[in-house]
């Protein structure tokens, strides 16, 4: 095991709350193992530090004569530059701050001048918005191999007038992806542009619009360790310049009269209202921190941890690990599995209550994919990233082994669709002293790397 995990004994970047403890049903408290970053990733320590440094200067962006306002405006626009650089934006590309990937995708959906093509393995955020686009949406069933899927895409693109091909950068269920270069070559050959849902990808792998030829990318701060309510859409400006503002309001107008409105140009056209300065600064800080890592180092770290987790799960009876394609490249650090005959929610509740491990259970906002896999009842997902360590994987595996062996300290029942501990001795979140909880968390220093 030590050789397999040689790249992953320590996290690559320190996270806020990495050493917070949680109570177990047997009365012990253990370090919280958070393997649910694919849903919401804890803040990087450097992100929290940047936010704390900026807060004393917080003021109105773009609309104030005061010095703090000028500082805030500069910080906001510097953040825009950093976020664009993070995804290799071309000189003419526009970077628009949004709330998250879903928000960014809905924005672009209102700008696409024709039909959108998307695969059925996507997150709902990359399926539902396109149904509202002007030209409509065509959903293509994924094939058993990457090669066959690319051929199916080529067939549709050659026979239909498609304006945009939308693909995930990495599946939020399996971590797999199609080869971006091949997707771009294929789409551009038939006159279609490419949108990449980068929500899962960008905390794990880099993407350059300029180098790859991808036309648009969207991503969320809460997926890249910047959970302060900001996301971004980055890409070609022409479609976005020619449409009505995404939101109508202050900041999006150049001039307004009783009879007419003259909308502004550039990113401000779609950023009406008071901008989320703190979110933008946090997103930029995360982008800079992730960009400082060597790509090979990140890949080796995740590969070691993911390989150990998959190997350990497959050693257990009745465990299946999800895959979309038999010939895909190595996935990012997302592992979804199920244990035969066990409700995923029950296993997740057990892991949390008796081993201090947080995983996600359910259908992961990817219902068509889970149905295709034959896992319509859901599964369990563990996600690994730059803040993960070998001990996290071993704790999860130990917990799953304990379940298989029947080693349980509590009884569980289902209430309102959720599994809970019967006569749970742990304090409920609602009864916790929030001040004490915050103080306890503050006392837990980030891990040393």
Image (cartoon, rainbow, N blue to C red):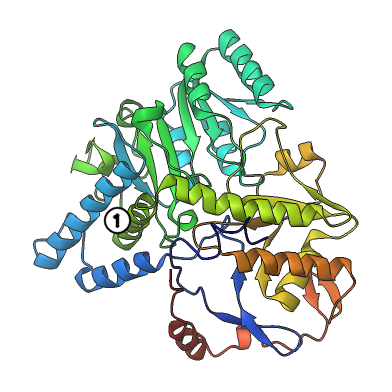
Q: Which residue is mark 1?
A: 275
**Which residue in the rendered view is the most extreme toward the front?**
3
Q: Position of residue 183 (x, y in %)?
A: 52, 23
Direction from residue 410 to residue 45 in the image, left or right: left
Foreground residue among 356 and 366: 356
Q: Position of residue 397 (x, y in %)?
A: 74, 64
- The image shows residue 138, relative to residue 348, as above or below, that is above
Direction from residue 273 to residue 386 in the image, left or right: right
- The image shows residue 247, relative to residue 313, as above or below, that is above
Direction from residue 301 to residue 65 in the image, left or right: left
- The image shows residue 261, relative to residue 163, as above or below, that is below
- Tell me which corner region of the image, top left, top right, bottom left or bottom right, holds residue 408: bottom right
**Residue at the spot x=36%, y=55% of the render?**
283
Q: Is the C terminus in the top left, top right, bottom left or bottom right quadrant?
A: bottom left
**Residue at the spot x=62%, y=57% of the render?**
3
Number of marks in the image? 1
**Residue at the spot x=52%, y=17% of the render?**
186
Disc 1 secondary structure class: loop
* Label 1 CA crowd tier, 10 Å (few <14, some 14–19, many 20+): some
**Residue at the spot x=21%, y=66% of the render?**
59
Q: Position of residue 102 (x, y in %)?
A: 50, 46
Q: Does residue 257 appear anywhere in the picture?
A: no
- Tell me which corner region of the image, top left, top right, bottom left or bottom right, holds residue 368: top right
Q: Is the N terminus in the top left, top right, bottom left or bottom right quadrant?
A: bottom right
């Amino acid at each position: 095991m030590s050789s397999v995990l040689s790249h992953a004994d320590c996290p690559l970047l320190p996270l806020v709350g990495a050493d917070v403890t949680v109570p177990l049903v047997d009365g012990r408290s253990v370090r919280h193992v958070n393997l649910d970053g694919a849903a919401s990733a804890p803040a990087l320590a450097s992100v929290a530090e940047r936010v704390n440094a900026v807060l004393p200067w917080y003021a109105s962006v773009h609309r104030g004569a005061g010095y703090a306002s000028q500082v805030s405006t500069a910080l906001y626009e510097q953040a825009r530059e950093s976020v664009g650089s993070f995804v290799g934006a071309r000189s003419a590309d526009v970077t628009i701050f949004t709330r998250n990937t879903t928000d960014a995708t809905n924005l672009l959906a209102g700008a696409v001048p024709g039909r959108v093509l998307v695969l059925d393995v996507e997150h709902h955020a990359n399926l539902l918005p396109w149904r509202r686009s002007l030209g409509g949406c065509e959903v293509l069933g994924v094939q058993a191999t990457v090669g066959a899927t690319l051929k199916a895409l080529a067939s549709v693109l050659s026979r239909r007038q498609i304006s945009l091909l939308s693909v995930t950068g990495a599946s939020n269920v399996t971590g797999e992806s199609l080869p971006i270069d091949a997707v771009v070559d294929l789409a551009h050959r038939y006159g279609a542009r490419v949108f990449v849902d980068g929500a899962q990808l960008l905390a794990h792998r880099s993407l350059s619009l300029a180098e790859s030829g991808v036309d648009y990318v969207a991503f969320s701060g809460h997926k890249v360790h910047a959970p302060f309510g900001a996301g971004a859409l980055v890409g070609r400006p022409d479609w976005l310049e020619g449409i009505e503002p995404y939101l109508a309001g202050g900041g999006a107008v150049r001039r307004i009269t009783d009879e007419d409105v003259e909308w502004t140009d550039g990113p401000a056209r779609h950023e009406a209202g008071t901008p989320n300065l703190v979110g933008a600064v946090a997103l930029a800080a995360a982008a800079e921190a992730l960009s400082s890592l060597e790509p090979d180092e990140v890949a080796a770290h995740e590969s070691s941890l993911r390989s150990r987790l998959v190997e350990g799960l497959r050693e257990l009876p009745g465990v299946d690990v999800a895959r979309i394609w038999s010939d895909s490249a190595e996935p990012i650090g997302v592992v979804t599995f199920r244990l035969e005959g066990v409700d995923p929610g029950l296993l997740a509740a057990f892991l949390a209550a008796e081993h201090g491990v947080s995983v996600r259970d359910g259908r992961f906002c990817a219902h068509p994919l889970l149905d295709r896999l034959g896992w319509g009842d859901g599964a369990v997902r563990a996600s690994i990233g730059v803040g993960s360590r070998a001990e996290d994987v071993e704790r999860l595996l130990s917990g799953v082994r304990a379940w298989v062996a029947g080693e349980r300290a509590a009884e569980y029942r289902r209430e309102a669709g959720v599994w809970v501990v019967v006569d749970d001795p742990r304090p409920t979140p609602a009864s916790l002293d929030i001040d004490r909880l915050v103080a306890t968390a503050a006392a837990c220093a980030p891990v040393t790397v």
